[in-house]
Image (cartoon, rainbow, N blue to C red):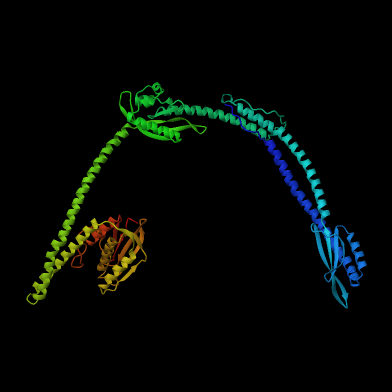
């Protein structure tokens, strides 16, 4: 295919000529400007020399004439000075009065200098007047103008002669050979890549290679490489076609101008059962799409092609034996000169996958139904649990308060009537009622923690620890060292986190009761690359063999007679931590204290 360039031809030689002229002109302007400036400054220096000559030779003589008031002699001396080159005008003033002048004063293109006129009288130099000398620069400007004309004219002639010579040489040595190469490349055919490029030039007897020889050699090498690439491409194309036709996907190509397939892979026979030639018939593909899908499929292809976007879609087709199959069509647009001219892509048989999705959708619908049923049952169970909690709170607490109250009455009113054994039994009854009441309170708290919705906000854990420590200290006479890391904040439910703090701080306080110099510490650390809060004490500790039990309800590692408690506090703490999506665990050793780590997952 022959390509032609449109627009005016703008040769490199012409651009080179313009570049040479411009560069030569620029150099001429710079050098000439420097030369003219130097000549001008020399002219100025000559005027300064004349000023110096007037000052050293004539001013003293003029001062004598002015002192003796010899005006005629003054004028004669001024006429002698005015003969000097470039002196335009001179005048002499005495006490502000013009005494003598010569010449015509100019308002521009002049240099003016004033000389004081002094005379020695009675041993002192007395200023008796001033001499003003004005020199004209007209001669300097005239000389500079003549030099500019000479320089410009001479350099213009030299520049254009040189440019013409360069243009001729460039055209003879380069331009005509480049045109030969361009004509050769334009006529080059892939079926005649062995044709040799030859330039019309003398053979270099020394076999020295210039740039054109290197370019011709590179052009020949390009022809050889192109021939090898074309052969490789042909082999690759044949291999690719064989590879494509060996897959289960159906490759295809369509011409947008005719809306007909130009290629359909042989896989179409095994997937859909129609002979390949049928696909090249008008509207064959459209006629075998499921009627419910035709409108959406054609609409998607038309709009995407109009928007110049690659696209894909899923639809149903009927096979030759009237079966319904699901097809996934992946479409790419073929462009020519930035305009869509065709489509190509792959049709994938996704029938099995689609049937599995439909079956999965049925399972999902059934699962959603089961979840709805289980949710309803769970809501009912929660209501029953709330009713049970209400019953526990009111129906069980009343008898316990009665047992505790009447036990207290017996202790107060019949204390002297009971022996030591009877009093001990009564104390046990009262204590058991109180413990049972505390267990009920803890169970209700555990139940409430499970049902309560989280109210998340930013809270200061360090402040909560301080408040808990102050409450414990107010109800105790113990002297415990408590270390609290400042300004530890988190995002959590403040009421629920307060339950964590109260339980862990109360446990640390309780289990350090038999420790001298007890101390409790709160802070933040990192374990296994995760941040954790911790509460540490130096109390009695526990055996790590029983670590799995401490967060379960009613599991106690110490005797109730030794340390009070219901065994529900740490279970409640764990429930709160898990409700926040966090973790809790402990490390301990008997006699060396314990440390409880916890995190709140919303952080």
The image position of residue 563, as x and y in percent, is 21, 67
Q: Residue lying furthest left in this view? A: 417
Q: Quadrant of the C terminus?
A: bottom left
Left or right placement of residue 140 versus residue 385 in this view: right
Q: How many marks?
A: 0
Q: Quadrant of the N terminus?
A: top right
Q: Nearer the viewer, residue 50 or 565?
A: 50
Q: Is 570 situated above or below 263? A: below
Q: Residue lying furthest front in this view? A: 97
* Residue 190 showing in the rendered view: yes
The image position of residue 488, as x and y in percent, is 36, 63
* Residue 590 showing in the rendered view: no
The image position of residue 512, as x and y in percent, is 26, 69
| Point 78% across, 45% down: residue | 152
Left or right placement of residue 493 versus residue 23 in this view: left
Q: Hey, which quadrant is residue 420 in on the image?
A: bottom left
């Amino acid at each position: 295919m022959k390509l032609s360039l449109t627009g005016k031809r703008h040769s490199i030689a012409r651009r080179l000529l313009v570049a040479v002229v411009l560069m030569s002109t620029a150099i001429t302007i710079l050098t000439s400007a420097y030369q003219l400036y130097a000549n001008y400054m020399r002219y100025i220096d000559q005027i300064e020399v004349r000023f110096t000559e007037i000052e050293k030779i004539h001013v003293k003589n003029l001062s004598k004439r002015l002192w003796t008031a010899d005006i005629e002699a003054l004028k004669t001396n001024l006429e002698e000075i005015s003969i000097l080159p470039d002196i335009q005008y001179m005048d002499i003033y005495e006490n502000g009065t013009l005494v003598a002048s010569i010449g015509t004063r100019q308002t521009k293109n002049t240099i003016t200098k004033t000389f004081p006129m002094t005379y020695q009288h009675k041993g002192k130099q007395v200023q008796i007047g001033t001499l003003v000398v004005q020199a004209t620069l007209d001669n300097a400007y005239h000389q500079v103008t003549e030099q500019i004309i000479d320089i410009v004219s001479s350099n213009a002639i030299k520049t254009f002669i040189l440019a013409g010579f360069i243009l001729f040489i460039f055209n003879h040595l380069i331009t005509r050979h480049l045109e030969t190469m361009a004509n050769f490349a334009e006529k080059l055919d892939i079926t005649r890549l062995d044709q040799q490029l030859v330039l019309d030039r003398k053979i270099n007897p020394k076999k020295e290679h210039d740039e054109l020889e290197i370019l011709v050699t590179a052009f020949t090498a390009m022809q050889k490489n192109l021939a090898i690439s074309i052969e490789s491409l042909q082999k690759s194309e044949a291999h690719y076609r064989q590879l494509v036709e060996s897959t289960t996907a159906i490759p295809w190509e369509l011409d947008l101008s005719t809306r007909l397939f130009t290629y359909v892979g042989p896989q179409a026979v095994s997937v859909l059962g129609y002979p390949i030639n049928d696909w090249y018939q008008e509207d064959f593909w459209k006629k075998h799409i499921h009627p419910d899908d035709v409108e959406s499929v054609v609409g998607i292809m038309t709009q995407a092609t109009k928007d110049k976007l690659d696209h894909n879609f899923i639809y149903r087709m009927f096979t030759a034996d009237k079966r319904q199959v699901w097809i996934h069509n992946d479409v790419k647009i073929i462009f020519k000169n930035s305009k869509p001219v065709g489509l190509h892509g792959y049709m994938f048989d996704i029938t099995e996958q689609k049937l599995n999705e439909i079956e999965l959708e049925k399972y999902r619908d059934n699962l959603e139904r089961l979840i709805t049923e289980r949710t309803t049952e769970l809501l009912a169970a929660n209501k029953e649990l709330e009713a049970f909690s209400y019953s526990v709170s009111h129906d069980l607490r009343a008898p316990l308060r009665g047992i505790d109250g009447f036990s207290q009455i017996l202790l107060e009113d019949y204390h002297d009537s009971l022996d030591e054994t009877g009093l001990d039994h009564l104390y046990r009854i009262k204590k058991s009622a109180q413990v049972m009441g505390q267990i009920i309170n803890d169970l209700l708290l555990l139940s409430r923690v499970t049902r309560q919705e989280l109210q998340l906000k930013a809270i200061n854990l360090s402040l909560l620890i301080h408040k808990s420590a102050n409450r414990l200290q107010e109800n105790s006479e113990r002297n415990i060292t408590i270390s609290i890391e400042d300004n530890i904040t988190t995002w959590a439910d403040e009421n629920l986190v307060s339950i964590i703090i109260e339980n862990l701080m109360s446990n640390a306080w309780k289990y350090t009761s038999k420790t001298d110099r007890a101390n409790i510490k709160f802070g933040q650390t990192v374990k296994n690359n995760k941040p954790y809060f911790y509460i540490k004490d130096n109390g009695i500790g526990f055996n790590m063999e029983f670590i799995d039990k401490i967060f379960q309800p009613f599991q106690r590692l110490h005797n109730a007679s030794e340390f009070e408690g219901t065994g529900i506090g740490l279970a409640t703490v764990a429930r709160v931590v898990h409700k926040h999506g966090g973790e809790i665990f402990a490390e301990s050793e008997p006699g060396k204290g314990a440390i409880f780590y916890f995190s709140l997952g919303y952080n």
